[in-house]
Image (tube, rainbow, N blue to C red):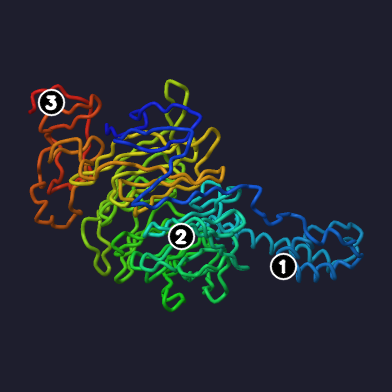
Amino acid sequence: MVNMCSLELFPTPIASDGRTLREVNERLEDGVNECVVIDEAHIYPTIEVRNEDIMKPSITNESVDNIFITKDMTLWKRFLRCLKTRGFVSALEMISEYDNYYHLENSWFLRFSQKLCQTLLYLWQLLLNFYIFIYPYALKSNEELCHEFNKSMDWRNGLIRAFQWHPNGHKCAVCHINDCIYIYSFDNSFVPLLKHSLQTKVTALSWSPTREDILAVCCDSVIILWTLDPNSRQYRPTSDCINIIHSPISPLTDMKFDPSGQYLAACSPQSSKLCLIEVEKKEIVKTIRRFGTCFTRVFWSPDKTRLLSATTAKHIRVYETKGWSSAKWNQQFSGICQTACWSRPIGHLLLVALRDCPSVFAIPFYDSPQPNDVGGTRHCLEVLDISEHEFPNGIKVGGSIHDMIWDKNSERLVISFKDNREWIALYKTVIRPNLEMTPIGFVHGLPQEIPLHISFNDSFRSGSLLTVCWNSGVVSYIPLQFDSKTNKSMYTSGTPRSLTSFCVASPNRSITSNNTSLRGTPLRPSKVLSSPLIHFTPNDSVLSPKRPLLFTTFTKRDSSYDSLE
């Protein structure tokens, strides 16, 4: 039986009247008063979105036709009118549901037309069922799809729809529920507003990693590129700052710049196309299509050599960016991909979380991709168990994952949940030489507050800076203060971690020279492990010539370990 890190190993969370303020030496501190975060003499902006300050668009399900009096018309005139205004299927339904007995008895043509419409509707339903089997989200509205596949915990009703730090970390973009975007910087006295008539149903924001003035906004059916002059003091930038790229797919649910800032990748859960947009040309230069599979999220690897796409099927697909060939992973996948994150700064490890599944899977990519060869191992293993757990004080945590992010050096991992949404799990992570995850604690807000967005500021110097957008409209900064030099494995060199250890070579590939010492090395601790739950069997190996093991398994404590030194 394989054991792994579970939520019961966390410190018991305690409900308080304040928010989590910071982490100091792997201990979380709570408080009522927010901390003023200062990094290199810069004060981070104070952001609070108030409900009464937002002018929301009126939303109603009523049709304007309801205010007019219906005029008596013949059946065929109503048929033509319905065909023109509501479509062919609605017109067929109107004829098939016609129930005037007198007209039906005295008109053979009407009876024949009704039978014909019923037959056509039956054939249409068969075709529609087959189409839905291939594209399961085809009948959902654009708003429903944006809400279901968005990074935000509550896209439809949350005050903050999208949040994105600039890679340089000196400014951020915040999209409100009314699709207005505000740009905050360290100098909080001037906050520009970005608004356009086509800027509706905003689902994602992405800053160019190589330029400070380009912000991409992912909308319902267009992508808007804002070019913002950092020296301008205009509250509303003019139309000269806008480039609109019309997308052949809709609704767009995700979009991201690649690490070089040259391309944008965009996708939709109602299309089997993955669009690549060249930023300089402001147009779509490549369309990748996989029949029968639609795309919901995209994730670039930090080195730009791979692109992960989450799909509406029970697998993920990774593309290499030289020849754009792909490979899919579906081992042990019981649902569609909810979120994923690459290890940084190189991208040797990929963590994947599934929808309605309280587990995290890992796939290593220690080889460089080649044309027609994505690389990586073809096996993945569950590395975290975050099933719902109730602590002795009655607090429940864990369950299905909503979002998962890794900081700039893969030293802190943060996971938010769909089920018990008030609590955010924080892990200390070490990926050299082996993956090791240590529970630190749970981040929380004020009572009844729910995190809408979680993100890291990559420019923070004193550790990592976790940014949480709460449903109350408050954006809080939580410094995770630690020394990267001391953020090392809790075990001695060569000892596998207490959760899962992965080999440094892909199956059927040669091991690099600096890792050849791991071939066939037995998993023997150099000293007795302090954990009473996890111990390794002496016969397990990191890599066997006959059966390459991606991850090592471990069993309960064995008395034979007491003699190991």
Q: Quadrant of the N terminus?
A: top left
Which residue position holds label 3? Answer: 561
Q: Closer to the N terminus: mark 2 or mark 3? A: 2
In the picture provided, is 235 more to the left or to the right than 52?
left
At 60% across and 56% down in the image, what residue appears? Answer: 143
Q: Are marks 2 and 1 in contact (CB under 8 Å)?
A: no
Residue 53 % position (x, y): 64, 51
* Nearest to viewer (mark 2 / mark 1): 2
Q: Closer to the N terminus: mark 3 or mark 1? A: 1
**CA distance separating discs 2 and 3:** 48 Å
Residue 164 location, quadrant: bottom left
Give the amino acid at mark 2: Phe
Which residue position holds label 1? Answer: 87
Q: Closer to the N terminus: mark 2 or mark 1? A: 1
Give the amino acid at mark 1: Gly
Element under label 3? helix
In the picture provided, is 129 more to the left or to the right than 371?
right
Residue 396 % position (x, y): 46, 29
Say few, some or many: other residues with alpha carbon within 10 Å of mark 1 (under 14 / 14 to 19 / 20 or more).
few
* Nearest to viewer (mark 3 / mark 1): 3
Which residue position holds label 2? Answer: 295
Residue 344 location, quadrant: bottom left
Give the amino acid at mark 3: Tyr
Which one is nearer the viewer's eye here, 264 or 545?
264
Element under label 2? strand
At 67% across and 54% down in the image, what residue appears? Answer: 56
In the picture provided, is 89 more to the left or to the right than 421?
right
At 52% across and 49% down in the image, what residue appears? Answer: 47
